[in-house]
């Protein structure tokens, strides 16, 4: 299985529900990573304030920080190679990079949704 690591800036918490306002992106990534974990897919996530040694001990991340600084965090590594810089991976990117089915995120594939709906507009409980 592929190894994904996310190195993020210093945060007060990983969920985004601390402080005055909720950060929806932190909430999304926390939820998605938790769902992946429940399906046996582990993604390591490191916060600069709580795990600075991980930033120092990872050669790729250490070089990135020396060259670019912390302003471009978060960065996502896949098998030790930087894949995404400056943002968290989207749900689709996670599925593609990790080579797992979208159902691992608790979502149905688009084709299955159309098949179940019979290809018609089922709004209002009409034709389905």
Image (cartoon, rainbow, N blue to C red):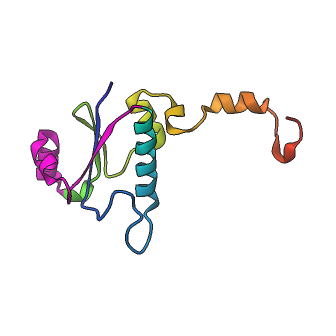
The residue lying furthest to the front in this view is: 38
Expressed as whole percent of the image width and height from the top left, the position of residue 45 reads 29, 46
> Vertically, is 15 above or below 39?
below
Residue 28 colored in magenta in the image: no
- Residue 103: quarter of image: top right
Of residues 26 and 83, which is closer to you in this image? Answer: 26
> Vertically, is 110 above or below 24?
above
> Image check: 41 left or right of 111?
left
Residue 49 colored in magenta in the image: yes
- Residue 13: quarter of image: bottom left
Looking at the image, which residue is at 24% across and 61% down?
10
Expressed as whole percent of the image width and height from the top left, the position of residue 102 reads 52, 33
Looking at the image, which residue is at 12% across and 50% down?
53
Expressed as whole percent of the image width and height from the top left, the position of residue 97 reads 38, 32
Looking at the image, which residue is at 82% across and 40% down?
122
Give the residues in magenta: 40-69
> Image check: 128 left or right of 63?
right
Quadrant in the picture for the C terminus? top right
Quadrant in the picture for the N terminus? top left
> Vertically, is 115 above or below 106?
above
């Amino acid at each position: 299985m592929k190894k994904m690591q996310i190195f993020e800036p210093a945060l007060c918490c990983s969920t985004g529900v601390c402080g005055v306002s909720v950060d929806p992106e932190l909430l999304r990534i926390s939820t998605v990573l938790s769902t992946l974990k429940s399906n046996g897919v582990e993604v390591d996530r490191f916060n600069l304030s709580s795990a600075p040694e991980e930033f120092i001990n990872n050669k790729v991340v250490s070089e990135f920080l020396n060259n670019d600084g912390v302003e471009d965090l978060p960065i996502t590594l896949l098998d030790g190679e930087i894949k995404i810089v400056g943002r968290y991976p989207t749900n689709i990117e996670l599925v593609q990079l990790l080579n797992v089915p979208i159902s691992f995120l608790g979502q149905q594939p688009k084709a299955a949704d159309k098949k179940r709906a019979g290809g018609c507009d089922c709004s209002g409980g009409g034709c389905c």
